[in-house]
Amino acid sequence: MSIRTSTLAAAVAAALLPTLSIGSSHREAPNITRLPTVDSTDFYLFNSYEPGRDGFVTLIANYIPLQAPYGGPNYFAMDPAALYEIMVDNDGDAREDLTFQFRFTNRLGEGGRGIALGIGGANVAVPLKNIGPVSSADSSFLNFRESYTLTLVRGDRRSGNADAVTTANGGTTFGKPYDFVGTKTFGSVQGYDAYARSFIYDIGVPGCAMPGRVFVGQRTESFAVNLGKVFDLINLVPVDGTVFPGGILQDPKNNLLSDANITSLALELPASCLKGTGNGVIGAWTTASLRQVRILNPVPTFSKPEINGGAWTQVSRLSHPLVNELVVGLPDKDRFSASEPRKDGQFLTYVTNPTVPAIVDALFRDAVNQTLKTSFANLAPATPRNDLVTTFLTGFPGVNQLAKVTPSEMMRLNTGIVATPAAQQSAFGVAGGDLAGYPNGRRPGDDSVDITLRVAMGRLCHPLTLGGQSVDLGLCKPADAPIGTAPLTDGAPQSSADFDTSFPYLRTPISGSADE
């Protein structure tokens, strides 16, 4: 397949936002650190590779980062005052054509009264969210329950036509499983898995002839990153030590998120219902919004801790990983969280001269040169970064570029490219010769840290092997990226083997107590 940059992509290179990412999106802006329940951590968009699910697209938006599995007694409920949304653009104008809105409700057990025990003649409310075993067959000891509604809006997400997404029997309320507090509560890891899977629903999507599926619940953290060292001025030599002695060695122990959970909002929808009348390529992103005004209740109750009012105000946004952390300057990170893809040109100054490659050069030039046995005077690729414009803003012509090109930061997926079975996926996506992977969408097993670190340092300036052939993308020259072919890495490997092969793909969360 020939993949060449378009004249348009080259023309807009000097006027757009080439985004750069190296990982996930946890606590990425000052304001969102104060609002963890609406902090989006990862967004996945891929053609479903579960056997028998050809023609479906999976969208997964993760929220509430760095959940300690033992984080009781309240654990990690979604915010009932928030609006969580997954948007799809199918015509290329960087505006949402379809929006899937999630709204959450929580209530106490015993029909909202809360479980109470008779103590010395008094009826006393219990302090815990469960007081006995919980299973899909019996949840009577559960003292806290979450549910949600799902709405599809066509057109503008605030003024378009809204219709309820329904269960197979026409219901409009979906249950969310209680977090995995431990094996005594749920019997075993397998017991929790069976319980959680009972909350996978077949859904009727308005205007779509075929049913989809939805699941919302806690999952094992799906992102792998050498987190502490990466943000300690990248406290490692970011070259694969299994190939070049002196670099970081690949080791699952380097993934410092391996003991954490997250909460996933997962949809599986027929591609035919997403792609509209375009060319089969879609763009997507996730956001969370709060009401503009919040007044705290000086005498708070379970049902009314505050009063919320005013317009919905976006406070979180995510498509490609780690854009806000490592591209946007600290003064404007919250602005990026509140912005829309069509307005991304406002961040031009931060990215026309990307800083991360310069930081890598400043920190590691000597170490990388020594490890690779080279003597480059500057490791950072030359500007302008047309390769980043194509990767993150316009998509690749003939692969994942929408029919209309409106440069904007969103995940793009060609729904017509056949999904690669899990066992055959390359963890390096397109850079590994697998066109069904990142940045043509993003699958859970795509090692986005290594992929985007390599892209940041100019991998796309060098030929790729696609379909058994060497392909020059024509975005930049090999001489523009001196270490573009180096096996850059954070040493925390990730692949499809770390995930399930069926919806919702992300694995059963880590137990809050040891599995006895």
Image (spheres, helix red, strand yellow):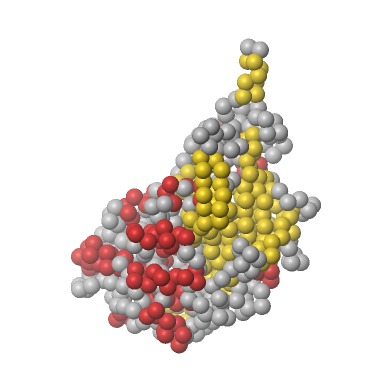
Instruction: Specify the farthest residue to the right.
Output: 169
Q: Is residue 338 left or right of residue 159?
A: left
Q: Is residue 418 left or right of residue 320?
A: right
Residue at 30% across / 67% down in the picture?
A: 355
Residue at 42% across / 49% down in the picture?
A: 33
Residue at 27% across / 64% down in the picture?
A: 359
Residue 308 rendering spot, x and y as whole percentages: 56, 47
Q: Image height check: is 59 above or below 417? A: above
Residue at 36% across / 57% down in the picture?
A: 491
Instruction: Specify the farthest residue to the bottom.
Output: 7
Give residue 360's quadrant in the image.
bottom left
Residue 245 rendering spot, x and y as whole percentages: 27, 61
The answer to whether one can see residue 499 in this image is: no
Q: Quadrant of the C terminus?
A: top right
Residue 430 rendering spot, x and y as whole percentages: 48, 72
Q: Image height check: is 344 above or below 212? A: below
Residue 128 rendering spot, x and y as whole percentages: 57, 29
Instruction: Specify the farthest residue to the top.
Output: 120
| Viewer-proximal residue among 371 and 455 | 455
| Viewer-proximal residue among 475 and 169 | 169
Q: Image height check: is 162 above or below 136? A: below
| Viewer-proximal residue among 49 and 339 | 339
Give residue 151's quadrant in the image.
bottom right
Give residue 48's quadrant in the image.
bottom right
